[in-house]
């Protein structure tokens, strides 16, 4: 039964009655399309326009109608699909835009592959991962079936290395694969909380130098969460024998997850029993994993096709949500996504079979924050939560009605018998699931709207244009309000771009401040409440990042995790500002043509002054005397030089290289104690003695010299970060993109994403 038509929500919005059939694209949208989506010639130049791309996609997807009816009006369907894409009302996931109507033809965004407890299964999964990444998809895995480390291997009488060691092999394989030249591979790794290797998994990414192509999440069970609440114990179970091997205090494990997530965002958590409670086809199998961003739980060998409706386009000329128009868009989008399943070229036969057996689609939303602004509703408010529930309930209801109508025309999904729909006596359904809230990433750039259901990531940011000049990109509605209010000026917009938000600006009125809140202005509790509101009416899961200030505590994170559990969320991803070493620093500025290409985590070393002081330490290594010169400036240790005595040659070159890299680290603000810890104790076959201590190797000698220098030179603070470089907390908002230099970089769902050029990286 259709729910009662929601009451219209008043506000101020754009007209939608006479939108053009040629896409009206922003400069950022054109930049992203030309770089990542449009067909190119052999020299990498675009050979199609955005309108031609939308026509290519619409034509290819519409042709699936002929599979179901020889009399289908494909031209009318094509025009319907073309209109909603060119009007930026609906966009499918990136692989569909990139590959529909082209040779590759792989249209799915996400896959889950099984990983069994055998070398054959593990390396088959690695091979299949490479094929999927090459085709443009992301992959999710559960490693929970692999026997724990030090468990017996019957065939060899040896011992298992455990799931985490095999994850590093998947990670290395991903590093070598470029996804069709447009997207780099991303993985989700999941381990059940009751696996014996769970502690190693929780801590696997604490140093940020492992599994960099993985997001990881712990699959929390209901038994575990109940034990956390009661401060009880729970069992660790060997997946090979199904026997309990140990018991742990649940609250201690939970606190460890919280602490590591507070430190750098990993691991996330999913509530695996809750996910399987909503599994529509339990007879087919158990859900073990999700896609890389966590919003799409899938069975092994299952894929999903996602798409999103732009909510800004359903605010009508009178400033109300036009539910009639939204309903038409939902119906067309469900038709579109169901067709994708039929014309898709799947990378594996097993994936095609499982996907067509369940025909899952994931229709979601983008532009929610922008819609609230048009309606005059603050994001962090009770009214916004109510609107979220109202809109998503309507979308869910309409999507299911559309799927039921398709089932009457085309038949239910093949695995319908024994599904939850069959058990409930519902009418046929074409799709086992219909709704998902995904992170829209580059799609929101193309549609010129806010990403998914997230708050604004920034009111203004700096975009690096082709001539390496800085252009301030300002939210269009804020700019109009600023001009109308008489406080618009370029300098103010640049100042906002440095911070991202406007909450501390006296020039801006409180009513405008309440509307233009960014992700960092919204408290973690409101983030969770909004996620829960959408989850209430979403078949699959909801992509949402809970943002914390840099000074948030582990207790704050724990509170949010428990709130997510109690409010019905299926998982949580958090990010504490400035917590990742890979966070790109440098607010406000952009890289210039003369500067080296940046990568995530890079900072510019402070320059060398004309005069510098220091001293030289002589140490007796096993390879001969090594002379280590250490200099400092007014901020602390600055550089290290090393040279060998008569034993120079190759060993001398190596020690010099180590010293140069240490110098680069010191000049870039790395703490001295971190440098010492990295090289101290490295051993070679011929140790020596110098300055009264045993010298294990040339790197160890440099470490010993650093320690001695810190003791002998007054005023050097042990372990101090070099002054003159902004801290991660100070540079947390609007960091610089390593690809285009713009300050539109955002962290979310374990990934980093640039709102200016579409650069993304997960893990």
Image (tube, rainbow, N blue to C red):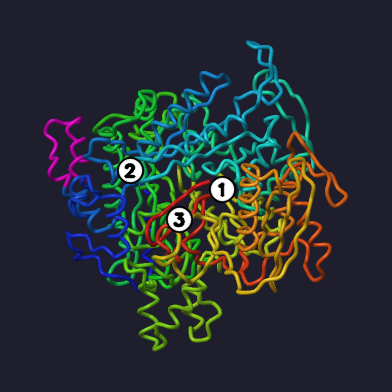
Quadrant of residue 365 in the image? bottom left
Question: In the image, is residue 95 above or below residue 69?
Answer: below
Residue 642 spot, x, y in % from top left: 68, 54
Q: Secondary structure at mark 1?
A: loop
Residues in magenta?
Answer: 57-78
Q: Are marks 2 and 3 in contact (CB under 8 Å)?
A: no
Mark 2 or 1, closer to the camera? 2
In the rendered image, is residue 728 in sight?
yes
Instruction: Answer few, some or many: residues within 10 Å of disc 1's Cα (few below 14, many 20 plus, some between 14 and 19).
Output: many
Residue 417 spot, x, y in % from top left: 40, 24
From the viewer's side, name the closer residue of 504 and 424. 504
Q: Secondary structure at mark 2?
A: helix
- Tell me the residue that label 1 is attached to: 569
- Tell me the residue that label 3 is attached to: 753
Rendered residue at 33%/34% (across/down): 430
From the viewer's side, name the closer residue of 520 and 681. 681
Q: Which of the two labelled residues, at mark 2 and mark 3, occupies the earlier sequence position?
A: 2
The disc placed on residue 95 is 2
Quadrant of residue 484 in the image? bottom left
**Residue at the limit of the structure toward the bottom, as seen here:** 486
Q: Marks 2 and 3, how far apart in space?
A: 17 Å
From the viewer's side, name the closer residue of 302 and 463. 463
Q: Which of the two labelled residues, at mark 1 and mark 3, occupies the earlier sequence position?
A: 1
Residue 342 spot, x, y in % from top left: 27, 32
The quarter of the picture where the N terminus appears is top left
Residue 554 covered by magenta stretch: no
Q: Marks 1 and 3, how far apart in space?
A: 24 Å
Question: In the image, is residue 454 above or below residue 232?
Answer: below
Question: In the image, is residue 547 above or below residue 648?
Answer: below
Instruction: Answer few, some or many: residues within 10 Å of disc 3's Cα (few below 14, many 20 plus, some between 14 and 19).
Output: some
From the viewer's side, name the closer residue of 306 and 401. 306
Rendered residue at 70%/65% (across/down): 631
């Amino acid at each position: 039964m259709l729910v009662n038509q929601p009451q219209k929500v008043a506000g101020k919005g754009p007209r939608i009655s006479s939108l053009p059939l040629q896409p009206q694209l922003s400069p950022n949208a054109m930049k992203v399309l030309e770089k990542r989506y449009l067909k190119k010639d052999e020299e990498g130049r675009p050979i199609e326009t955005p309108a031609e791309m939308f026509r290519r996609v619409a034509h290819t997807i519409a042709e699936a109608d002929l599979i179901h009816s020889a009399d289908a009006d494909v031209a009318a369907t094509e025009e319907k699909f073309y209109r909603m894409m060119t009007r930026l009302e609906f966009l499918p996931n990136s692989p569909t835009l990139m590959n529909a109507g082209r040779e590759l033809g792989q249209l799915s965004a996400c896959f889950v592959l099984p990983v069994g407890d055998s070398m054959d299964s593990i390396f088959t999964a690695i091979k299949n991962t490479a094929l999927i990444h090459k085709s443009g998809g992301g992959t999710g895995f559960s490693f929970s079936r692999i026997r724990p480390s030090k468990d017996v291997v019957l065939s060899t009488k040896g011992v298992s290395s455990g799931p985490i060691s095999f994850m590093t092999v998947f990670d290395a394989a991903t590093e070598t694969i470029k996804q069709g030249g447009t997207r780099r591979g991303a993985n989700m790794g999941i381990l059940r909380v009751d696996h014996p290797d769970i502690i190693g998994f929780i801590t696997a990414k604490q140093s940020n130098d492992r599994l960099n192509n993985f997001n990881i999440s712990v699959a929390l069970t209901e038994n575990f969460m109940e034990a956390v609440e009661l401060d009880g114990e729970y069992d660790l179970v060997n997946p090979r024998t199904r026997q309990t091997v140990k018991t742990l205090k649940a609250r201690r494990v939970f606190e460890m997850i919280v602490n590591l997530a507070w430190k750098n965002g990993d691991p996330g958590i999913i509530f695996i029993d809750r996910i399987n409670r909503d599994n529509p086809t339990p007879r087919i199998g158990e859900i073990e994993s999700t896609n890389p961003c966590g919003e799409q739980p899938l069975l092994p060998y299952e894929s999903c096709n996602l798409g999103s409706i732009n909510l800004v386009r359903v605010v009508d000329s009178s400033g109300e949500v036009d539910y009639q128009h939204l309903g038409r868009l939902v119906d067309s989008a469900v038709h579109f996504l169901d067709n994708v399943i039929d014309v898709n070229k799947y990378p594996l036969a097993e994936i095609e079979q499982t996907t067509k057996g369940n025909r899952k689609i994931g229709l979601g939303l983008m532009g929610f924050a922008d819609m609230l602004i048009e309606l005059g509703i603050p994001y962090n408010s009770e009214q916004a939560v109510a609107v979220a529930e109202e809109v998503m309930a309507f979308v869910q209801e309409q999507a299911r009605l559309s799927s039921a109508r398709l089932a009457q025309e085309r038949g239910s999904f093949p695995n319908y018998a024994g599904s939850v729909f069959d058990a409930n006596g519902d009418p046929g359904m074409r799709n086992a699931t219909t709704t998902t809230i995904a992170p829209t990433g580059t799609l929101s750039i193309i549609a010129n709207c806010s990403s998914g259901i997230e708050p604004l990531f920034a009111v203004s940011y700096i975009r690096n244009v082709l001539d390496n000049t800085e252009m301030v990109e300002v939210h269009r509605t804020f700019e109009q309000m600023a001009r109308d209010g008489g406080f618009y000026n370029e300098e103010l917009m640049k100042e906002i771009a440095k911070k991202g938000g406007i909450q501390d600006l006296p020039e801006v009125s409180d009513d405008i401040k309440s509307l233009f809140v960014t992700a960092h202005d919204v408290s973690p509790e409101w983030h969770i409440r909004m996620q829960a509101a959408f989850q209430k009416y979403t078949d699959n899961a909801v992509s949402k990042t809970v943002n914390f200030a840099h000074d948030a505590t582990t207790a704050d994170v724990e509170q949010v995790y428990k709130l997510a559990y109690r409010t019905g969320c299926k998982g949580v991803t958090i990010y504490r500002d400035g917590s990742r070493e890979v966070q790109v620093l440098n607010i406000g500025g952009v890289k210039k043509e003369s500067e080296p290409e940046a990568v995530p985590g890079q900072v510019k070393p402070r320059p060398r002054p004309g005069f510098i002081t220091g001293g030289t330490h002589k140490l007796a290594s096993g390879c001969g005397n090594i002379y280590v010169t250490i200099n400092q400036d007014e901020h602390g240790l600055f550089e290290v030089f090393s040279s060998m005595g008569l034993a120079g040659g190759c060993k001398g070159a190596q020690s010099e290289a180590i010293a140069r890299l240490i110098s680069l680290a010191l000049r870039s603000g790395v703490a001295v104690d971190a440098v010492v810890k990295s090289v101290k104790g490295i051993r070679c076959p011929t140790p020596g003695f110098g300055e009264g201590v045993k010298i294990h190797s040339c790197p160890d000698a440099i470490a010993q010299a650093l320690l001695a220098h810190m003791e002998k030179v007054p005023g050097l603070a042990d372990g101090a970060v070099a002054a003159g470089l902004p801290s991660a907390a100070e540079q947390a908002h609007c960091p610089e993109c390593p690809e285009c230099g713009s300050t539109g970089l955002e962290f979310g769902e374990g990934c980093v994403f640039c709102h200016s050029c579409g650069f993304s990286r997960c893990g």
